[in-house]
Image (tube, grey):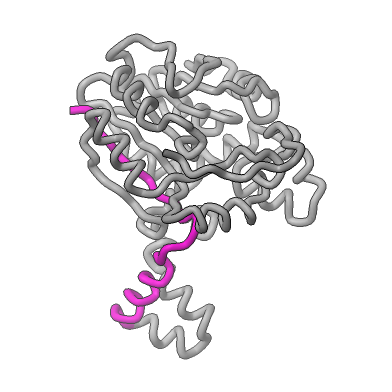
Amino acid sequence: MILAPFSPQKPMTFEAAVTLLRTRPNGVRLLQEAYLDANPREAAVRFAASGEFAEALRLLSPAARGIIVDLGAGNGIATYAFAQAGAAQVIAIEPDPSPLVGRRAIENITVGLPVETMDALAERLPLPNLSVDIVYVRQALHHLHDLPGACREFYRVLRPGGVVLACREPVVDSPAQLRRLLASHPIHRLTGSEGAYPLPEYLVAFKMAGFELKHIWGHWDSVINAHPTVGTAAELAVYPAAWLSRRLGPIGRLLGRFALFRGLAYRWLSRSVPGRLYTFLAQKT
């Protein structure tokens, strides 16, 4: 069961919250880091060229040339990127009709591409059994109130051997961690729409649906999770040493030469903090 978040007294729509954040100090930077630019096409082009998407494409190839469901597609950055990368078809599932953060944004930036948008929820996908090759989810599972039901739907629509790649899902270990996460979350403070699951609940939902979990990446295990702190896999590989240098100066640069201290830095970076990000690769067998 998802841990219950608090809600603001007058919750905004997601579009209204994004619009308001653009007027606040550091708001534009935060939104650009989340690929919520005022121009969705510019955001999509940046995402398609990112180290995060390059890693997702590497993990999903060669199936990424098949039929892909982009679940919780938002403003369409991944829909656009997969279509440009050669997918046969991308089905963008997005219930928000917004021209800024929803279906109309997707339709505007994917003209001429093999893309179909659908107004639907993860728990009730309007797709036939055994009809898609990949379900791609970026920062959407934690919004669901029926995670097990959604995973069963993923399993239903995937062909045998198909995969779910669920990226950048926040993890909390307790109600106290959830409260800390939401109290500092700029979007949640306006919309009341955010949430998070404990790690075991993600894993159980996949396994109970019938999936084999092929891989689990913690926050500093993949460039997918580490964005925007690092932009490429190469930057991620040297980040513990760079972190030591930034924190401790010349001493840190010296310590960063040794695997022992790089390992200690990695353990510190990977500690249990509210909302640390995980990515999951699950396969239908």
Placement of 198 over or under 42, stated as above or below: below
Looking at the picture, how far across and down is residue 194, in whole percent? Answer: 57, 41
Quarter of the image containing the C terminus?
top left
Quadrant of residue 34 in the image? Answer: top right
Looking at the picture, how far across and down is residue 211, in whole percent? Answer: 24, 32
Magenta span covers which residues?
258-285
Q: Is residue 11 left or right of residue 44?
A: right
The residue most toward the top is 128
Q: Is residue 109 left or right of residue 39?
A: left
Rendered residue at 48%/74% (across/down): 243
Placement of 198 over or under 192, stated as above or below: below
Rendered residue at 79%/42% (across/down): 20
110 or 16: nearer the viewer: 16
Q: How many numbered discs sit on the rendered protein?
A: 0
285 or 76: nearer the viewer: 285
Task: Assess whether residue 49 is covered by the magenta stretch.
Answer: no
Quarter of the image containing the N terminus?
top left
Looking at the picture, how far across and down is residue 206, in whole percent? Answer: 29, 35
Looking at the picture, how far across and down is residue 263, in whole percent? Answer: 32, 74
Q: Is residue 187 left or right of residue 223?
A: right
| Residue 284 in view (yes/no) | yes
Q: Is residue 68 left or right of residue 185?
A: left
The residue most toward the bottom is 251
Rendered residue at 20%/21% (across/down): 160
Task: Assess whether residue 262 is covered by the magenta stretch.
Answer: yes
Placement of 56 over or under 110, stated as above or below: below
199 or 239: nearer the viewer: 199
210 or 29: nearer the viewer: 210
| Residue 232 in view (yes/no) | no
